[in-house]
Amino acid sequence: MSSTASGVILKHYRDVTLVATSAHVCSMKHGNQIRMFAPDYRQDSPFWHVLEKSMFTLSDLNGKKTTGVILKIDYMSDLCVLASKKINKPAVKIALMDPLVGEKYFNVAAPRGIWGKRLVPLLEGRFVGKARSPFTGGDTYMFTIPATGGSSGSPIFNWYGELVGLLHSAYGGFHHICMAATNDQLNILLSSSLMKLRKQYDSYKVILSLHI
C-alpha cells in the first residue's frame, strides 16, 4: 500500500529538518482510511494484521529524496511532524495572526500526485471561517480551496508567504471546500516536537544515518 501526500518544512534544528504533514498520512488507521486500500478490513477481524510504517520517503522541489521518521503526531488537529536529515531548503514562517474571512490564500500541493521537479500546483481560495471538524473533532480552518487525494499535508499561505494552515481534509461530495489545521495548532506541535528532538537528538541522528 502506497500513496503520495504533501508537506512543508517547519524548522531546521542542527542537522535535522522538521517536516509537517497530516496525521492520516503518517497513520493509515487514523480515520479508518485503510479501508480505501482494503475495503474488507475490520479491526476485530483475526485475518488482518496491519503493521504501519514509521519511516517515509520525502522528495524536495528538486526531486532529491531523503527519509523522514515520525517525531510527533496530533490526531485531534490531524498533524504529523517528521524528522529528516538536513534538507537544504528554507523553513516557512508560521503566521501569528489568524486568517481573515473573505481574504484570498494560496495552497501549494500535489493533488493526485501531480508534481515534479520544479513543478508543483499552486491553488487559491478564500478563508470561510473556523469550525469544528466532523472528521477529527478538533478546531479547523475552512477555505474554498479545491483539494483531493495527495493534497493532505499541503501548506496554505497568506500574501506575505506565511503559513496560516495545513490542509488535511475535503468533503467527499464537494472537493472545493477544504479543512486545515490552524496556525495555533501548528505552533503547539512544533514546540513539542522541538522539545522531544532536543532530548533525543542523538537517537534520531543515529536512526537517520542508517537511511538515505
Image (spheres, rainbow, N blue to C red):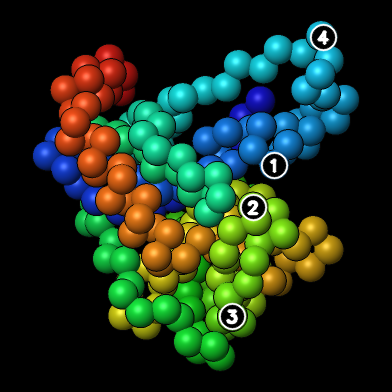
| Circles 1 and 2: CB atoms closer than 8 Å | yes
Q: Is residue 30 visible?
A: yes
Relative image position of residue 90 (x, y in whole percent): 22, 56
* Label 3 sits on residue: 129
Residue, x 82% and y 23% (percent of image)? Answer: 42
Q: Classify 10 Å Cα crowding around label 2: few (below 14), some (14-19), many (20 and above).
A: some
Could you tell me how far apart the alpha carbons at marks 4 and 3 are, in whole angstroms?
44 Å
Residue 47 is marked as 4
Q: Which residue is mark 2?
A: 136
Q: Nearer the viewer, mark 4 or mark 2?
A: 2
The residue lying furthest to the left in this view is 14
Residue at left offset 64%, top offset 38%:
30
Earlier residue among tags 1 and 2: 1
179 or 105: nearer the viewer: 179
Q: CA distance from mark 3 to mark 2?
A: 17 Å
Q: Position of residue 169 (x, y in %)?
A: 64, 57
Q: Are marks 3 and 2 in contact (CB under 8 Å)?
A: no
* Residue 46 horizontal/vertical position (percent): 81, 9
